[in-house]
Image (cartoon, rainbow, N blue to C red):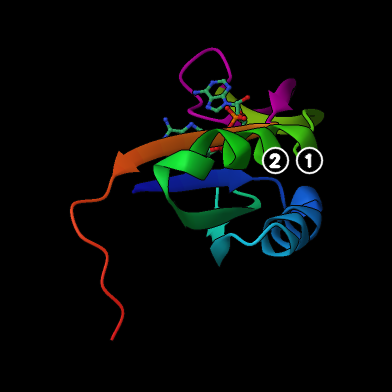
Amino acid sequence: MKLIIAIVQDEDSARLVSKLMDDGFGVTKLATTGGFLRAGNTTLLIGVNEDRFDECLRAIESVCKSRKQITSQPITMGGTTGMYAPYPIEVTVGGATVFVLSVDQFVKF
Ligand code: 2BA
């Protein structure tokens, strides 16, 4: 068995959870926050048997889209003022950041 940890954008999460549930996968949804943008995203925990692992990855890939976002990163102004000025930069977020772990044991009580 594998545990898929998928970090996805909030905009894709409802549709992805619905698709995974419709397809018979077990899913746990966590509300999370990205360290760089400091904005909300969604982390899904999906325990999946090896024979359906590729199918699950394809489902994630098919739903999660990449999007461009503008963020204001503070940059230090010159001199000794120590002041910061917001500097807008564009980043491409997603489709999905996926980690895969091998599960030693899976038990339900
Ligand atoms: P955030 O950390 O909020 O990052 C959002 C997007 O900002 C990233 O999209 C990336 O395009 C950009 N970004 C992140 N760090 C950057 C940096 N130091 N300099 C310039 N741009 C940067 P994604 O790569 O698609 O990541 C989406 C979310 O997935 C991340 O949100 C974070 O919550 C998670 N994530 C990505 N890589 C991760 C990792 N190695 N470990 C844990 N979580 C990760």
Distance from Cα at disc 2 to Cα at disc 1:
6 Å
Q: Secondary structure at mark 2?
A: helix
Neighbour class for label 1 at 10 Å: few (<14), some, many (≥20)?
Answer: some
Question: On the rendered structure, is 97 left or right of 80?
Answer: right
- Residue at point 41%, 41% (across, down): 50
Which residue is under mark 2?
59
Q: Position of residue 27 (x, y in %)?
A: 55, 64
Residue nearest the observer in this picture, 48 or 78: 48
Q: Is 87 contained in the magenta span?
A: yes
Q: Is residue 5 magenta?
A: no
Q: Which residue is mark 1?
A: 63
| 66 relative to 35, above or below | above
**Circles 2 and 1 in contact, beta carbons < 8 Å:** yes
Residue placed at 59% from the left, 42% from the top? 56
Read off the magenta span: 76-94
Image quadrant where residue 101 sits: top left
Q: Quadrant of the C terminus?
A: bottom left
Dot 1 amino acid type:
Val
